[in-house]
Image (spheres, rainbow, N blue to C red):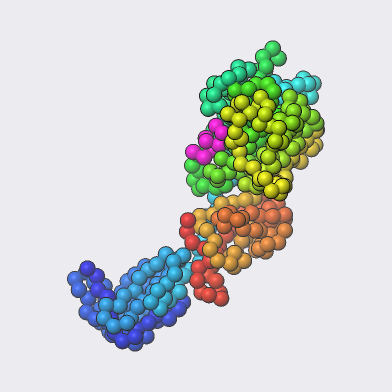
Amino acid sequence: MGGAPTGAGGTASPGQGGSTSTGAAAPAPVGGAVSGEGGTTAANGGSQAQGGAIASSSGGKITFSSAGRGGAFVLLPPDEPGAGGAAGVCSSLQVVPGIPTVLILVDNSSSMFEPTDESPWDLLYSTLMADDGAIKTLAPKVRFGFTSFKGNNIPQMNETDEACAKLTSVPIALDNFAAIDKTYTMLGAEWDPNVKWETPTGHALARAATDLAAFQGDPPGPKSILLVTDGNPNTCQIVDPQCGQDLSIKAVQDAYTAGIKTFVVGIGEVIVGNNGCEPSWGRCGPDHLQDIANAGLGLPVEPPPETFVWQSCADAYGRELQGTYDTTGMPGAAKFYTAENAAQLTTAIEELLTALACTVEMDVRVTGNPAVGSVLVGVGKEPQVYGDPNGWKLEDNRYQVTLQGAACEKFKAEQTLDITFPCDPLTGMPVAVKR
């Protein structure tokens, strides 16, 4: 079914609307779309006949084979190579930017409320929920979720048992400031100084990442976890000592594999000492925060000391490490954040959330030269320079664009972004394809 043009040496010239060269068309069988001289063949908005043209409005390529009888033209996806004397026919792709999703995961253990006069919990609340803070400012263009976690003071629970920790969550949504504020306030009022709550960070991270991975936003966008904690982690099976570093790293690495990045902010005792954590058993305090930050971006993580496997901490998981560690002595150096006061915490939170808001996920993947792309920011559609610290860059996955410096600030202020990937002027071929 469907006719095919024949003739001697008919070819299609490159470019949208390239005309065919000589070669008469054969009569079409039933259902065919090829006519004789002067006729047309419709294919994705194109036409073919002697004196006609081949064009594509789909951003794909059309190949046209004309070697003897039975020659035919075929529409190929943009990322497939042409064949039989391909004619590169493409059009610009207008990108639909996605919306970032950030799940704020907050440690709700007992130590977050100590000392009572200026507790980490109150410090974090005043920063996160300020009227001029990052969450309220970014809420119209970032989907925020909120989850707090606190572990039961009951050892020997399985790591996957939800009874290990109480998680309180606010569903992910745009303009979510009021809902998060209400839940955060409620959690603060529930604190009981007579009840001790633990810090099973790995357990909480695993559950939060599962929920975040299942969330389907429209349009989609990059997903991230922002972990805020004041203590070294324990496990569900061992409450004290605190030896949950390995399970926390494993959970963060699993999240990264699922496409979720993790960023960490340390406040309170975790940044000044090793309370409950022995360095001979595992990496504590700021060292552990560094490991979480590295794992959150898929970078190498330094292994715990060799003495770890001989200590009681290892009994929590059969004396075998669960995370993946680099043994070449070349760990990553991802940025992590610590804060001892309100000013430092405000700076850390705003810097992190602003950076996440300025990374947008596209409905295309760049397969060619990204510098060909057009990125316009603001209501005046100001063009931005690729690779410039005040312009934009393409992330390694090739479907996320990050606005940097002045471009990011302008985007935050005016919330307008236009991204287009045209054909490469040197090759005439597409530089991006639909995902």
Instruction: Say whether residue 4 is visible.
Output: yes
Horizontal and vertical percent position of residue 243 = 67, 28
147 or 319, nearer to the observer = 319
Residue drawn at x 77%, y 29% is 274
On screen, residue 21 above or below 376: below
Give the residues in magenta: 205-214
Query: Within the image, what quadrant is residue 422 found in?
Result: bottom right
Residue drawn at x 64%, y 42% is 325
Instruction: Say whether residue 178 is visible.
Output: no
Quarter of the image where the N terminus is located: bottom left
Horizontal and vertical percent position of residue 2 = 24, 70
Horizontal and vertical percent position of residue 298 = 62, 47
Query: Within the image, what quadrant is residue 336 found in?
Result: top right
> Is 213 covered by the magenta stretch?
yes
Horizontal and vertical percent position of residue 427 = 53, 75
Residue drawn at x 46%, y 70% is 90
Residue drawn at x 74%, y 37% is 287
> Is 319 covered by the magenta stretch?
no
